[in-house]
Image (cartoon, rainbow, N blue to C red):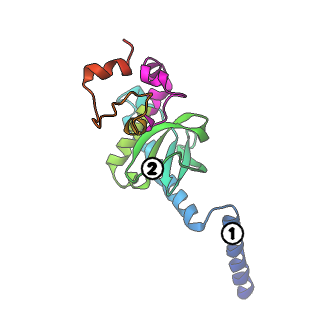
Amino acid sequence: MKRGLFSRLIIGVGFLQLALLADGKSPARSQAVSAYADSLREVFALRDKIKDIHPLLATIHPVAISEGEDLLIFKPDETRKCYEFDTRTPAPMTIPKGVRAAFPLEVLDGQPACVVTGEVFDSMEGYVLIFHEFVHCHQYLACEQKLKGRLLVYRRAPGGFHPGELLRRWRKDDPVLGRPKSGCSCRPRKDIRGDIHDG
């Protein structure tokens, strides 16, 4: 009897591993997703402690965790007070270790997410920085597009700028940005003001 149960158990585990591999997930990846989901539970606990400081801190946003060349997207579930793994998607750019950012993601239909690397969960400071990025998510949803629309440099650029695009194009002597070709990396503030803002 025990021998039959043991062999069924081994066969069951084998099928589970095959199913995970066929789905594009290795057991190690599933463990990483579970570990991140567990770590993200702390976001809800911390939110409950700090939400009275300012109304912005009461709102939770999606979190994208960089893993290799991909982003693991987690969406908040307010009713269960946890984050649910949503999808794994290629990162829109190289995400270096230690990044703490917030920007819209195509996979979220242009909605912003807090974008971090996994070691953010190693300290309380990392969790605080997640909330800092949530403020930037709110900023994007509330007023960022309106503010960008007032910037001449943003209106000149075809399709606006993706995060990091302004700096990348500045470094490449992009004619839209009007960077001098003399090798100087900057111009006096009074000269650049007209390129950045109309008024």
Identify the secondary structure beneath mark 2.
Answer: loop
The magenta stretch spans residue 54: no
Residue 118 in the image: x percent, y percent?
Answer: 43, 54
Q: Which residue is mark 1?
A: 16
Instruction: Please give the range of residues in magenta.
Output: 137-166
Q: Looking at the picture, tell me which residue is in the foreground, 181 or 150.
A: 181
Q: Amino acid at mark 2?
A: Ile
* Secondary structure character of the magenta stretch overall: helix
Residue at the (33%, 52%) spot, across then down: 123
Q: Looking at the picture, tell me which residue is in the foreground, 153 or 71.
A: 153
Residue 5 in the image: x percent, y percent?
Answer: 72, 81
Q: Is residue 48 visible?
A: no
The magenta stretch spans residue 165: yes
Q: Amino acid at mark 1?
A: Leu
Residue 116 in the image: x percent, y percent?
Answer: 43, 47
> Residues under labels 1 and 2: Cα distance?
32 Å
Identify the secondary structure beneath mark 1.
Answer: helix
Residue at the (55%, 66%) spot, across then down: 28
Nearer the observer, disc 1 or disc 2?
A: 2
Q: Which residue is mark 2?
A: 95
Residue lying at the far front of the rendered structure: 182
Determine whether 116 is above or below 194 in the image.
below
